[in-house]
Amino acid sequence: MMHNQIKIIDYKDRYAEDFARLNRTWLESYNLLEKADEMQLDQPDELIIKPGGKILLALEQEKVIGTCALIRMGATKAELAKLTVADDARGQGIGRRLTVAIIDQARVMGIDHIILLSNNKLRSAIHLYESLGFRHTPLPADVKYATADVYMELRLPFV
């Protein structure tokens, strides 16, 4: 797989099954799939896109090999979620490219505060977030994921 053949594109309804499949695969493999995830995976347009969020996909030719979502939480705040890369495409920087692209989209959308919830089992994802400037902060009491034990924030400078 050649790195330069991978395109980052906006989500389209025709990729709904790929978005759900890729995310279910990794969530189930870590025993982290929850009701909140299921709802987002079953209704990405209703629960992520229409409320003002964004989903980006990594495509190799026409095959979806990665996803990353930005879920709007207010005028200037959003949650980074549903970052995944297919098993056979890992280790090539695709997760980083997706995350950087979603952060760039957040800036365009006027978002200056990105949060994310994760689980300490996901060491490589947490390392990626740290390398991009996300900082660990205490887990809020009202998180929507029972398995979340990591909470991170990124404050975007105005450009």
Image: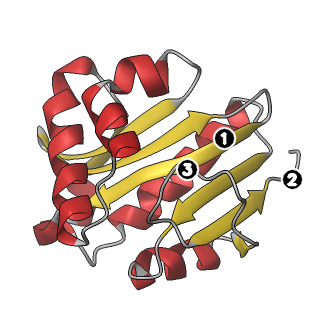
How many other residues sit within 10 Å of disc 1, few (<14), some (14-19) or many (≥20)?
many
Q: Quadrant of the N terminus?
A: bottom left
Residue toward you, 52 or 88? 52
> At x 68% / y 34%, what residue is drawn?
73
**Residue for badge 1:** 78
**Relative side of 90 to 45, left or right:** left
Residue toward you, 77 or 67? 77
How many other residues sit within 10 Å of disc 3, few (<14), some (14-19) or many (≥20)?
many
Tell me where residue 81 appears, x and y as whole percent: 47, 50
Quarter of the image where one finds residue 10: top left
Which dot marks residue 80? 3
Mark 3 / mark 2, whichever is N-terminal? 3
Q: Quadrant of the C terminus?
A: top right
> At x 16% / y 39%, what residue is drawn?
18
Kind of residue indicated by mark 1: Ala
Tell me where residue 112 appears, x and y as whole percent: 80, 44
Q: Is residue 73 above or below residue 13?
A: below
**Residue for badge 2:** 157
Q: Is residue 128 above or below residue 106?
A: below
> At x 72% / y 62%, what residue is drawn?
153
